[in-house]
């Protein structure tokens, strides 16, 4: 999966980012980013972001049918914090 996302991120003209979004119940889970660089050292070519989301928060949003909060959480998962 990581390989496929790296290839996807490399498909952009500028530095592209692909994301792996996964559920977590760990307190303080935060995003980690893997940078893919050219071998010539000219800088990053792409990034793969590993984005955890708090499963309890999603359950609460669904139970309360809070569309506004749901939209904010979805936006942060898709585009990052």
Image (cartoon, rainbow, N blue to C red):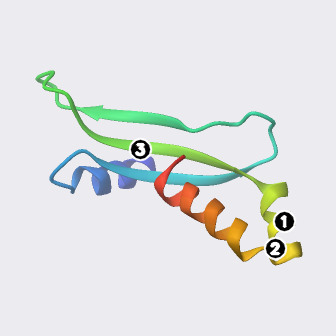
Label 3–label 2 contact, CB within 8 A: no
Label 1–label 2 contact, CB within 8 A: yes
Query: Which element carries disc 2, helix, strand or loop?
Result: helix
Q: Nearer the viewer, mark 3 or mark 1?
A: 1
Q: Is residue 68 left or right of residue 77?
A: right
Q: Is residue 4 above or below residue 65?
A: above
Q: Residue furthest top?
A: 41
| Neighbours of disc 2 within 10 Å: few (<14), some (14-19), many (20+) | few
Give the label on residue 18, or none. Answer: none
**Residue at 30% across / 52% down in the picture?**
9
Residue 45 image offset from top left, x and y in percent: 22, 39
Q: Is residue 48 left or right of residue 72?
A: left
Q: Is residue 66 above or below residue 53?
A: below
Instruction: Answer with the quarter of the image where residue 29 lies.
Output: top right
Residue 48 image offset from top left, x and y in percent: 41, 44
Q: Which residue bears the numbered disc 2?
A: 62
Residue 13 image offset from top left, x and y in percent: 15, 53
Cα gap from disc 3 to disc 1, whole angstroms:
26 Å
| Neighbours of disc 3 within 10 Å: few (<14), some (14-19), many (20+) | many
| Neighbours of disc 1 within 10 Å: few (<14), some (14-19), many (20+) | few
Is residue 14 or residue 4 the one in the foreground? 14
Give the label on residue 59, or none. Answer: 1
Q: Which residue bears the numbered disc 3?
A: 48
Label 3–label 1 contact, CB within 8 A: no
Cα gap from disc 1 to disc 2, whole angstroms:
5 Å
Instruction: Answer with the quarter of the image where residue 44 lies.
Output: top left
Q: Earlier in the sequence, mark 3 or mark 2?
A: 3
Query: Which element carries disc 3, helix, strand or loop?
Result: strand
**Residue at 11% across / 23% down in the picture?**
40
């Amino acid at each position: 999966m990581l390989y496929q996302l790296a290839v996807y991120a490399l498909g952009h003209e500028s530095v592209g980012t692909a994301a792996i979004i996964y559920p977590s119940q760990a307190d303080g889970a935060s995003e980690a980013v893997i940078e893919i660089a050219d071998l010539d050292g000219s800088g990053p070519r792409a990034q793969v972001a590993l984005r955890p989301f708090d499963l309890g928060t999603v359950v609460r949003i669904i139970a309360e049918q809070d569309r506004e909060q749901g939209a904010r959480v979805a936006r942060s998962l898709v585009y990052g914090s």
